[in-house]
Image (spheres, rainbow, N blue to C red):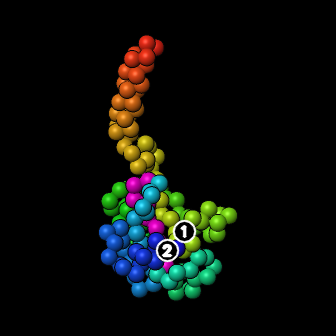
Amino acid sequence: MTCPFCTIVNQDCSDRIVESSNLAIAIEDGFPISKGHTLIIPRRHIASFFDMTDAERTALMELLNRAKAKLETRYKPDGYNIGINNGVAAGQTINHMHIHLIPRWQLAERYTTPLPQLVESVAVLSAKVDEHLKKMGCAL
């Protein structure tokens, strides 16, 4: 099975790339927890944080800071989650070491779907349920 991160790293032309260096790359997460969710990835395919060289660790921390600076400008989050899932038992789903940089907000804007859009979606769904119930003769 091909590593999805190696594909992005080796092509170095993905529109998801946020920052890069000779040892690491930062990309937008393909399945973001919140807007701006970023992954910091070593270019070398390694599974574990503990297998990185000191130079790779330094490069990842530098990119983490550069990605955070971009997020500050673009999204102005109130805080961040910074995490590494090291090993399957720890929740690592892609066997290529990566750091999650997840912007967080105090209010509902932190969610990927903006609150007004979510409320509108719930209202549309509720209307469809009501319509279906009426057709069945079970009006509320």
Query: Toward which corner of the image does residue 18 lie, by quadrant?
Result: bottom left
Residue denoted by label 1:
94
Query: Toward which corner of the image does residue 87 lie, by quadrant?
Result: bottom right
Residue 138 sits above or below residue 73 on the image:
above
Instruction: Name the residue furthest front.
Output: 136
Residue in view at x 49 percent, y 75 percent: 2
Q: Nearer the viewer, residue 111 or 94?
A: 94
Q: Nearer the viewer, residue 136 or 5?
A: 136
Query: Toward which corner of the image does residue 139 lie, by quadrant?
Result: top left
Q: Secondary structure at mark 2?
A: loop
Residue 130, can we see it? no
Residue in view at x 54 percent, y 68 percent: 94
Residue denoted by label 2:
3
Instruction: Name the residue furthest right.
Output: 89
**Circle nearer the N terminus (1, 2):** 2
Q: Residues within 10 Å of mark 2 (few under 14, many from 20)?
A: few
Where is residue 63 shown, x and y percent of the image?
43, 75
Residue 112 sits above or below residue 6 on the image:
above
Residue 127, can we see it? yes
Q: Quadrant of the C terminus?
A: top left
Q: Secondary structure at mark 1?
A: loop
**What amino acid is labelled 1 in the image?**
Ile
C-beta proximity under 8 Å, tags 1 and 2: yes
Taking 114 as reference, is 56 left or right?
A: right
Where is residue 44 shown, x and y percent of the image?
50, 83
Q: Which residues are magenta?
A: 34-42
13 in magenta: no
Residue in view at x 38 percent, y 38 percent: 118
Where is residue 105 shown, x and y percent of the image?
44, 50
Where is residue 10 shown, x and y percent of the image?
40, 81
Residue 120 sits above or below residue 85 on the image:
above
Q: Nearer the viewer, residue 115 or 5?
A: 5
